[in-house]
Image: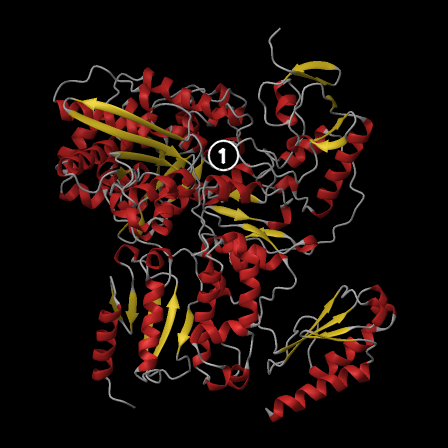
Amino acid sequence: MDNISPAHEASCSTGPAESTATGHTSAELSATDLETQQFNTVCEILRRNNNDPARLIPILQQIQKEYRYLPEEVLTFIATPLRLRPAQVFGVATFYSHFALKPHGKYTIRLCDGTACHVRRSTGILNALYERLNVDEERKTTSDQLFTVETVSCLGACGLAPVMLVNEKVYGQVTPEKALEIVEEIIVKEKQA
Amino acid sequence: MDNHPTLTLNGRTVSIRGERNLLEVARQAGIDIPTFCYHSELSIYGACRLCLVDIEGRGIVASCSVAPEPGMVVRTHTEEIRELRRISLELLLANHEQSCTTCAASRSCRLQTLCRRLGVEKVRFHRTQKERPVDHSSVSLVRDPNKCILCGDCVRACTEIQNVGAIDFIHRGAETTVGPAFGKNLAEGECVNCGLCATVCPTGALTPKPEIDAVWRDLNDPQKTVVVQVAPAVRVGIGEAFGLEPGSIETGRLVAALKALGFDQVYDTSFAADLTVIEEATEFLQRKAAGERLPQFTSCCPSWVKFAEQFCPEVLPNLSTCRSPQQMFGALARVTLPETLGIDPENLVIVSVMPCTAKKYEAKLPKFQTGGRPDVDHVLTTQELAVMIEEAGLQFRQLEPQSMDMPLGFKTGAGVIFGASGGVTEAVLRFAVEKVTGVRLSRIDFDEVRGEGSVREATISAGNTTLKLAMVHGLRNAHDLADKVARGECDYDLIEVMACPGGCIGGAGQPVPKELQTRAQRTSGLYQADKGLQLHKPQENHLVAHCYQTCLGDVGGHRAHELLHTTHQNRRRINSRGLTVLGQDNNSDKLKVTVCLGTGCFLRGSHSLLNALTERIQQHGLKDRVQVSATFCFEACDRGPNVRMGETSLFRCTLDSAWDAILKELEATPVA
């Protein structure tokens, strides 16, 4: 949370969970209300899942939707009502590559680097993204918290290779130029917002 | 021939007698199938793939995970199986840091043993794993991920037997390691230092932290007078390091070895255990008479105390306030020995030899210091002492037995049986029953409280009083009982808790047991040692009585309390940042309100309190002046829900009391 700049907090929309928690819509929220609302959402997520430790994975997914990653203090917090130890929660959170333990940007770009995409030169796209956004394999998220660039091993759309995923949206037959276009579009849209 | 169903094992007919898997059947038949991850006391994991067997018609399977069936035809060392096992070992060795000659676990390493047994002569694969940092943070244990083979024994022991869950598997695939939450080190988490993980670890990935060098330094310093106390369980464990039978009573040779190493005086922790019994039983009888803070939990196991401080804050008042025998000894020795030995207090070094890794942690607690110096300077485990004896070249088996030094080496059998599960209870009974009835107790043995079960209970009549007792080992069992106590569901008077299986004799500092029955043999050794002594009741220890006359005053009196008792504090489980819930910014003028969401406070409704408080602050438009956050423990769990406001702590906080305090605080501070 500490790392999210106010501009993004205010517009961060992450599904229906948050508005049911406080009765506010995202637009009405001021910057500092976000943490209250996020915390309430976590509580609501726990309640909806009956504090059931067997539902840890869906709980983590829902929390990640809210925070865009799994903050350590939230994992520590949920361990108690779930009757789990923080080490167990952390173990599950680190097992699945889908879970992020560092803050993700508002837009997560998942570039496929599976066999089909790789032979169709996904590496060039990756390098173009790295260069444009000033990120790399270690530091995956831009300093303005707008983008996170990751590679995945297969998106199951090899016919469209190379494939790129921006949040939930799939782009096929991507070229470095096309990838940069998509990124520029988002940057412009965010500036206007 | 019996009527049990049978199967064929390597061409032999073998009975199935209710064993839960083929591996156990083979063991019963005298075949020790190699394994890393199978422990009969833990759940079955099936990860190491060494216990492979060939079942006719089924092929090769892991014998730990297959239930025996009548008529099965099983072979345990076919060519194919031999090859598979060797490859598994080779692959494990590829990434295993092979610093075997300098490894602390060298004498008990199962990886070494199995490589030797299975004839692995060469490792064809290169190491692909990067060197990982070794965790030296804990005062009790060293965690070296480079030696871990991911069998998961430690994870299951920590969770299943101790219910601590301080470590788990993190990451996956080639990145997998075993470690505490959030990549923290052991000292920052919930670890209670019991060392069960080190006992079950087949390699040197988890080992007791040695203090040998510090002890040698003091022994070799001519200015220092180094005295040592030896815990009861050590005498029945040390022999195993020198090829003697488990449970053989080696008190005499132990003393001789310690003297030969250069210790000036050799004393017995059992002396302090006698003292502990008198204090603890007196405390118990007072509580029983007053009918308060019952059941009384014992407090001599430092792992249990830390566990209760972290996980069972509601029963902390029920814990005996007595220090453990090690710390009673330390405090008493610090005060009396300089005069007894005619030495400068500065030059007195107090060492203990313990079967336990948690005693290292206990000795370093700030509350057990006198004048800024720990009452016990160094704690050695039985294993470490064995290493020192070997280093000095002493032929342990040839040593001429010697006796302990007086006065702190004198003990009764009550102080000796302390080392076995049920022993503390029995020692307390030997004192308490006589005290309650006022009649000399002719019966010494209380067989009712002895046994191996991990949860046992007994009822003993003493005159008109009936005492309901429970003895548990394993902290999961203790936690269950503590929960029942907190819910008012059980009516025990006294609950003895030992973290380690079988009590201190099964401690992590002892030589690693080779067989399951080792613990029972050590226990029986302790009861034998009790029989071999002339006195069995702590109240018969005239040197303890003398100690009260000259130094301690009355039993349970003021001076005794100063030296022999302590307080237990709530302890934060994990070192983790808090969570800001409302009004976070960098404005330092804001009133900072922090609500605890740790286990104790959570159960007392701190969560709803936090929500209600946040809502009210928002309703009154005060979020510009107040910042609300959640934290995970103020270490005052008995008075929860806890709220901190600036520098002030509010205990048993309600919405109204918190709100009043906030308004008051805001009135006092002018708006900026």
Q: Quadrant of the C terminus of chain B?
A: bottom left
Left or right of B290? Residue B69 is right
Quadrant for residue B497, please give it: top left
Q: Is residue B630 at all visible to an observer of this figure?
A: yes
Q: Quadrant of the N terminus of chain B?
A: top right
Left or right of B608? Residue A150 is right
Quadrant for residue B632, please give it: bottom left
Query: Residue B188: horizontal and vertical position, in percent?
Result: 45, 57
Q: Give the residue displayed 80% in from the left and 75% down from the top.
A: A172
Left or right of B217? Residue B144 is right
Query: Residue B363: horizontal and vertical position, in percent?
Result: 36, 45
Query: Residue B244: horizontal and vertical position, in percent?
Result: 51, 20
Q: Is residue B349 at all visible to an observer of this figure?
A: no
Query: Colour scheme used in the picture?
Result: secondary structure
Which residue carries the number 1 mark?
B383
Vertical relation: B122 (above or below) A158? above
Depth check, front residue: A71 or B369: A71
Left or right of B23? Residue B581 is left
Chain ID at mark 1: B
Depth check, front residue: B179 or A1: A1
Q: Residue furthest top?
A: B1
Give, as a three-letter code, the residue at label 1.
Gln
Vertical relation: B227 (above or below) A164? above
Q: Give the residue displayed 22% in from the left and 70% down from the top.
A: B657
Depth check, front residue: B146 or A82: A82
Q: Residue furthest right?
A: A119
Few, some or many residues within 10 Å of mark 1 (<14, 14–19, 20+):
many
Q: Give the residue displayed 21% in from the left and 83% down from the top.
A: B668
Secondary structure beneath label 1? helix
Q: Residue furthest bottom?
A: A192
Query: Residue B193: horizontal and vertical position, in percent?
Result: 44, 45
Q: Give the residue displayed 81% in from the left and 81% down from the top.
A: A176
